[in-house]
Amino acid sequence: MAVNRKWRVRCTTDNKWEYTISETKPTVCPVDGGHTIDATLTASVGPVDEILLPGDPIGKILACDATDITKRAHIDCSGIGTGQTRVITVPDVDVTLGSGNVTVIQDSDESEKTETSTSYQLAKRFTKTLAIAKYKVEWYGEMGNSLADKGASFQVKIDGTVRAEVAKSIFNNVAYTPVGGFYFLNQASAGSVNFDFEIKADEEAAKLRKLRLMLTKVVE
């Protein structure tokens, strides 16, 4: 299979080095075919997917495919602070970029839910479509009770299985208490997953508000 290579050509007309990409050794100046070159100095500087040529826009073109030079990768350094040099260290393993993109899924319900039952009742369900991956599931809410110094409980179910519980905490009718936590979910198959938030009251009415859910795909 033919491989495109980068070539360095000495243009004696302009007295400068010019660069081009070709499967075969160039015989004319890549800038102007009418220019004179020193053919004894023409040399390959490597496959196009291995070497960044002098004169290539630094921070722009990084590499291109060995057989199709229209397939290119770029480096964007615009996020680096003025005067700063950042180093990319390549690990001693094969890495496919893009396979570990962090996916964040968010949802929230700010409304207040109340429950007088002494057994757990569904306050809010979030249903999310997940790919096969490991996720960090995080949640936050604020709980209270309609009377001072009364208890209430809160639990989180993921597809019907209890993953966390705040049981019989004492709340009052003025201040809300934050409840939150996290769980690592290994999603073995792609599809919809239910995230259920349930509450119950010891007495009077348990209250839940400002419920938030965030799922982050874990890169391993």
Image: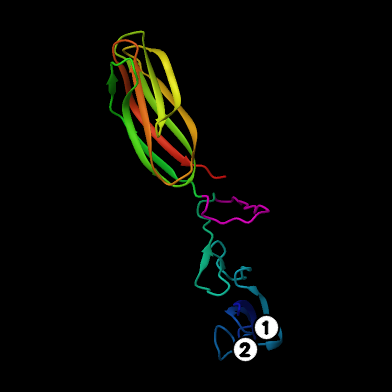
Would residue 97 be counted in the magenta stretch? yes
**Residue 63: quarter of image:** bottom right
In magenta stretch: residue 4: no
Above or below for 103 versus 97: above
Residue position for label 1: 42
Q: Residue at x 39, y 31 (%)?
A: 160
Total residue callouts: 2
Three-letter residue code for mark 1: Thr
Image quadrant occupied by the C terminus: top right
Residue 81 lies, in percent from the top left, at 54, 49
Q: Position of residue 68 (x, y in %)?
A: 53, 74
Which amino acid lies under the numbered mark 2 shown in the image of this protein? Thr
Q: Earlier in the sequence, mark 1 or mark 2?
A: 2
Q: In the rendered structure, find residue 88 and report the number of the disc placed on it.
A: none
Q: Which residues are magenta?
A: 82-100
Residue 27: image tag: 2
Q: What secondary structure is found at the residue carrying circle 2?
A: loop
Left or right placement of residue 194 versus residue 3 in this view: left
Examine the residues drawn in magenta and state their main secondary structure: loop
